[in-house]
């Protein structure tokens, strides 16, 4: 399953549009499922950072997208037996 790390709100609009198109849905079809006008949905897709969490989750469900929250993997501190802080490869 492909993953799409999301780190900023600016990444949402193109992702939402791509997910909608991948689902084979028009803005009008998504708007009907959300219970809003096509114009309102269009504004939501363009300004996704202004959309509330509950509505965004509902939208992602309509688009067939699962939300998975994860902490980034932190690199372990690199210490060698030599006492230096250089990574051991």
Image: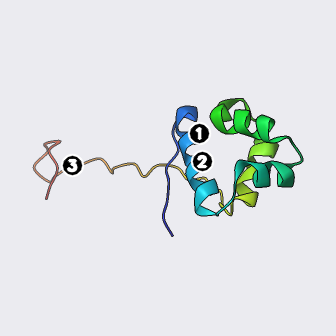
Q: x and y percent of residue 49 in the render?
A: 66, 31
* Above or below, comparing residue 53 to residue 66 in the picture: above
Q: Which mark is residue 13?
A: 1
Residue 52 visible in the displayed image: no
Of the numbered discs 3 and 2, the one sitting upstream in the chain is 2
Mark 2 highlights which residue? 17
**Residue positioned 21% across, 49% down in the render:** 79
Q: Could you tell me which secondary element the residue under label 3 belongs to?
A: loop
Crowdedness near tag 3: few (<14), some (14–19) or many (≥20) residues, C-alpha within 10 Å: few
The front one of 1 and 39 is: 39
Q: Could you tell me which secondary element the residue under label 1 belongs to?
A: helix
Q: x and y percent of residue 67 in the render?
A: 65, 56
Mark 3 highlights which residue? 79
Of the numbered discs 3 and 1, the one sitting upstream in the chain is 1
The front one of 33 and 38 is: 38
Q: Are marks 2 and 1 in contact (CB under 8 Å)?
A: yes
Counting the numbered discs, the total is 3
Q: Is residue 54 left or right of residue 67?
A: right
Residue found at the very far left of the displayed protein? 82
Q: Could you tell me which secondary element the residue under label 2 belongs to?
A: helix
Crowdedness near tag 1: few (<14), some (14–19) or many (≥20) residues, C-alpha within 10 Å: some
Q: x and y percent of residue 77 in the render?
A: 29, 47
The quadrant of the rendering that contains the C terminus is: bottom left
């Amino acid at each position: 399953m492909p993953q799409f790390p999301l780190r900023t709100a600016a990444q949402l609009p193109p992702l939402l549009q791509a997910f909608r198109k991948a689902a084979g849905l028009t803005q009008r079809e998504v708007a009907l499922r959300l219970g809003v006008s096509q114009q309102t949905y269009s504004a939501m897709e363009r300004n996704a950072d202004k959309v509330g969490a509950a509505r965004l989750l509902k939208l992602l469900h309509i688009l067939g997208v699962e939300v998975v929250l994860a902490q980034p993997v932190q690199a372990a501190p690199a210490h060698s037996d030599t006492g230096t802080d250089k990574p051991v490869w």
